[in-house]
Image: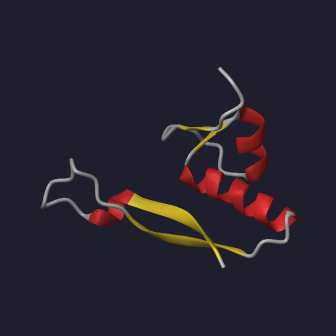
Amino acid sequence: EGQNIHYDSSSENITAESVFENRIGVCQGIVNLYDECCSLLNIQCLQISGYIKQNFIKKTEDLKNYSHIWNVII
């Protein structure tokens, strides 16, 4: 299977430690791990939250149901 970290929307791993140990997480956990790695390397990093639009979203659906988070290097 390898050492890669995989995204799984059903995962409950949201801490940097749990994502690193289990090699699986949701966006919040993966962002937290990336943020921790940047911190250890003295790289300034922010977490930015927002919403995503998927191709399968119907026009009547509310985007707030599709929140997401990203890292930004500053």
Q: In the rendered image of this protein, does residue 54 appear above or below residue 50?
A: above
State the image quarter where residue 1 is shown.
top right
State the image quarter where residue 45 is shown.
bottom right
Taking the image as shown, residue 9 lies to the left or right of residue 25, namely: left
Residue 54 appears at what percent x and percent y?
28, 53
Farthest-out residue, top:
1
Residue 13 appears at what percent x and percent y?
65, 44
Observer-nearest of 62 and 51: 51
Farthest-out residue, left:
59
Residue at screen point 72% across, 30% down: 3
Farthest-out residue, bottom:
74
Residue at screen point 78% across, 37% down: 21
Taking the image as shown, residue 15 lies to the left or right of residue 50, namely: right
Colouring scheme, one of rainbow, by chain, secondary structure, one colour: secondary structure
Residue 47 appears at what percent x and percent y?
61, 70
Residue at screen point 29% across, 59% down: 53
**Total marks drawn?**
0
Residue 57 appears at what percent x and percent y?
21, 53
Taking the image as shown, residue 50 lies to the left or right of residue 20, namely: left
Residue at screen point 52% across, 63% down: 69
State the image quarter where residue 71 is shown.
bottom right
Observer-nearest of 66 and 35: 35
State which quarter of the image contains the C terminus. bottom right
Q: In the rendered image of this protein, does residue 67 appear above or below residue 15?
A: below
